[in-house]
């Protein structure tokens, strides 16, 4: 398990990576990072929320398709439910929100 400061540093890097990828690829999303929450809003107002839950050292995604929790295992963020990879789930949620394909690179 990571230290709390390492978890915060790694998740901040991940949030910055997501924002950078969205900007670099010109996808129609607005990002806002406040506290432990990265809100990604599509052009039609649909929101995908990525939340860092420090006590459990988990990343959470809230989207129309549902809520997902991820823990770090061997360098990957994997779903606690079915071992889906974080970026696979996030790309699916972003694609559904935008009506097109979104392919953020894995950090």
Image (tube, rainbow, N blue to C red):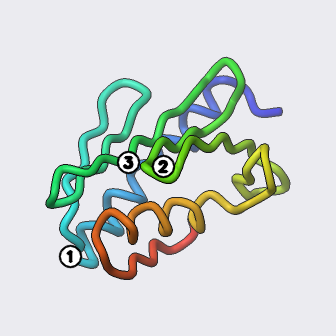
Q: Is mark 2 on a helix, strand or loop?
A: helix
Q: Residue at x 73, y 26 (%)?
A: 3
Please tell me how crowded label 1 is: few (under 14), some (14-19), or many (20+) other residues with Cα within 10 Å: few
Relative to the observer, which residue lies in front, 92 or 25?
92
Q: Is mark 3 on a helix, strand or loop?
A: strand
Q: Residue at x 26, y 51 (%)?
A: 46
Is there a contact, CB below 8 Å, between mark 1 and mark 2? no
Q: Residue 47: horizontal and vertical position, in percent?
A: 30, 47
Q: Residue at x 84, y 55 (%)?
A: 74
Determine the residue located farthest toward the front in the rendered image: 65
Mark nearest the camera among 1 and 2 is 1
- Sequence-wise, the earlier of marks 3 and 2 is 2
Residue at image mark 3:
48
Determine the residue located farthest toward the top in the rendered image: 55
Q: What element carries label 1?
A: loop
Residue at image mark 1:
26
Is there a contact, CB below 8 Å, between mark 3 and mark 2? no
Q: In this view, does 66 lie above or below 104?
A: above
Quarter-of-image position of residue 100? bottom left
Q: Residue 69: horizontal and vertical position, in percent?
A: 66, 40
Q: Residue 11: horizontal and vertical position, in percent?
A: 54, 42
Q: Is residue 40 above or below residue 2?
A: below
In the image, taking residue 96 as reference, residue 105 lies left or right, namely right
Res 42 label: none
Q: How far is mark 3 from mark 1, CA to CA?
A: 17 Å
Res 13 label: 2
């Amino acid at each position: 398990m990571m230290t709390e400061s390492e978890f915060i540093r790694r998740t901040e890097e991940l949030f910055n990576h997501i924002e950078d990828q969205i900007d670099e690829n010109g996808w129609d999303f607005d990002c806002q990072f406040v506290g432990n929450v990265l809100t990604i809003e599509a052009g039609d107002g649909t929101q995908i929320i990525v939340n860092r839950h420090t006590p459990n050292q988990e990343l959470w995604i809230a989207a129309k398709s549902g809520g997902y929790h991820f823990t770090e295992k061997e360098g990957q963020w994997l779903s606690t439910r079915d071992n889906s990879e974080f970026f696979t789930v996030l790309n699916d949620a972003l694609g559904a929100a935008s009506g097109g394909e979104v392919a953020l690179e894995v950090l």
